Image: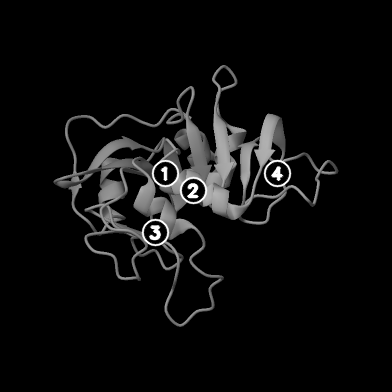
Amino acid sequence: MALDKNQIAQRIAQEVKDGYYVNLGIGIPTLVANYVRTDISVEFQSENGVLGMGPFPFEGEEDADIINAGKQTITTLPGASFFDSAFSFGMIRAQKVDLTILGAMEVSENGDIANWKIPGKMVKGMGGAMDLVASAENIIVAMMHVNKAGESKILKKCTLPLTGVGCVKKVVTELAVLEVTPKGFKLLERAPGVSVEDIIKATEADLIVEGDIPEMSI
């Protein structure tokens, strides 16, 4: 059974370690804050100038003045701080962020990412993605494995304009957890009920499959 977006976020939340400063990109990554373990201390940073984001607010408790980079209303945790975008990107460029979680339209087998523009379509702009991928040491991508036409987004080579080159370390999709290695994508885990054959069929890039592939624990 393929995962939904919340389950992808749940799996990525397992990658968040105690003491991490984490930047959450727009889309599926914003859901990760909802699923981080309560026994660890994590600081979520938003590029529009927030440090100390919490989970999304319950309906009726939203504050329109407190938003993330995707203009969604958020909560803040005790000790949270607000600052301008220049200060925020100073943190990012100075590599103060331990983990960056981004969405993507395509990822290639050597870790290239395309996540900001589809030629011929209106886009809001590249946002802070260029700075994030240029500065981050640890990038995990949250994305769907295939597009609406059923075509793979896990590719040998990206077809869309690149955001960053050779920067992605791991990809979590509705089907699998993949690690980017010097030899290409390595299959680490599969979604519950999804076979290795299903994942290979949905992947344009070659996959390294070693031994029995365990199911994800959600």
The residue pinned by badge 1 equals: 94
* Mark pair 4, 1: CA separation: 25 Å
Q: Residue at x 62, y 48 (%)?
A: 49
Q: Position of residue 69 (x, y in %)?
A: 61, 54
Q: Amino acid at mark 4?
A: Ile
Rendered image quadrant of residue 99: top left
* Mark pair 4, 3: CA separation: 29 Å
**Dot in front, 2 or 4:** 2
Please tell me which of labels 4 and 1 falls first in the chain: 4
**Which labelled disc corresponds to residue 146?**
3
The residue pinned by badge 4 equals: 74
Asked whether the beta carbons under mark 2 and mark 1 sit within 8 Å of each other, the answer is yes
* Mark pair 3, 1: CA separation: 34 Å
Q: Residue at x 42, y 68 (%)?
A: 149
For label 3, the crowd category at 10 Å Cα-Cα, with few meaning under 14, some 14 to 19 and many 20 or more, is: some
**Quadrant in which the N terminus is drawn:** top left
Asked whether the beta carbons under mark 4 and mark 1 sit within 8 Å of each other, the answer is no
Q: Position of residue 93 (x, y in %)?
A: 42, 48
Please tell me which of labels 2 and 4 falls first in the chain: 4
Please tell me which of labels 3 and 2 falls first in the chain: 2
Please tell me which of labels 3 and 1 falls first in the chain: 1
